[in-house]
Amino acid sequence: MPQQDPPAMHDLAAPLRVGIVGTGEIARAHLPGWQDLGAELHCVGLQGADEFAREAGATAHGSLEALLAAVDVVDVCTPTPDHPAIVRAALDAGRDVVCEKPLALTGEEALDLVAHAERAGRMLFPAHVVRYFPQYVAAREAVRRGDIGTLAVLRFERTGALPDRPWYADEELSGGIVMDQMIHDLDQALWLAGDAERVYAQQSIAASDGAVRTAHVVLTHRSGALSHCRGFWGPEGTQFRYTFDLAGDAGRLQYDSAADVGIAFDPVASARQAAGDGFLPDVSTMRDPYAAELADFVRARATGAPARVEAADGARAVEVARAALESLRTGRSIAC
């Protein structure tokens, strides 16, 4: 597809024109952030696009090509296997891209997308939303200040119900619990303790239900620190929970979303929280991290300043997750 000039380039006062590709739950998680930014919304999807358009006040398009011709920015909210082709088409059309994690299912393809964006001169923003959760932001700031000294051992845990879309349980399509769920904590480990040089992983799958599983990944960082990441996909009704425990030579920093909620829910709010499908955490009691990440993308796009997460970070997280999957397959520690 020949590169086209983004429509908004002709009128700097015009609202940002955003094309959302895929109209499922992640698109709905992104929607309030785009609305807060005053974006003019467009969408395309294999199913549900007309309903999403009505809900969002968006213009639905019949094809990706038609959407690309109408927007400045593309937000890729499709299942993971579709990410690379859509990202490349958007970049080739001269559009900046937000792409849900993971960028791709292999490190090679993720790196190719980063290179593709560089050749196109466009921005590729991997939507690693956990970098915008305030607890993790505060932890990073504390580590950078030296509050707990030199990091030695980091522990991360993330549990929840298996998402109710069938493709998540198919490791060929989603990369399984390591690539889809645990990539958040692998990214946090890299963000806090620096790059890793080796990965070792184990996984246990329930004999009674192959969708129920737990995985444990150990990263050996180049600094000498060790990160332990544990993920659990449980049956319907499993409570969403995330924790971290960061130990340095001068102290320790801990957080548990189940214990340190920071707010008491009344019966109505508790019922609303319990009615969730496990696909997304409840973020109603804190600044919406999805909105925060999109605002950061728009700021970086407008100013040229770095975003909190950049394309290379998204690719590196995929590389490390892929090394963990290789460790699962071989039983060996894998260099990464």
Image (cartoon, rainbow, N blue to C red):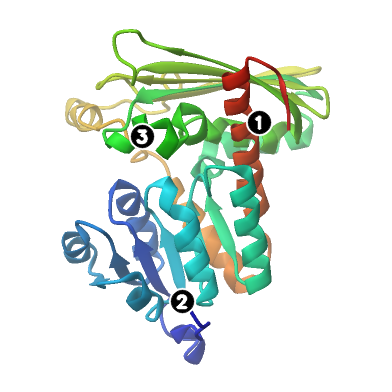
Q: Residue at x 50, y 85 (%)?
A: 4
Q: Position of residue 286 (x, y in %)?
A: 41, 41
> In which quarter of the view is residue 154 placed?
top right
**Residue beneath disc 2:** 72
**Residue beneath disc 3:** 168
Q: Residues within 10 Å of mark 1 (few under 14, many from 20)?
A: many
Q: Could you tell me the amino acid type at mark 1? A: Ala
Q: Could you tell me the amino acid type at mark 3? A: Tyr
* Quadrant in the picture for the C terminus: top right
If you read the primary sequence from the N terminus, does the residue marked by circle 1 or circle 2 appear first?
2
Question: Which element type, helix, strand or loop, lies under badge 3?
Answer: helix
Q: Residue at x 47, y 60 (%)?
A: 85
**Residue beneath disc 1:** 189
* Above or below 186: residue 154: above
Is residue 322 visible in the rendered image? The answer is yes
Mark 1 and mark 3: Cα distance apart in space: 23 Å
Front-lying residue, 212 or 305:
212
Q: Residue at x 52, y 65 (%)?
A: 88
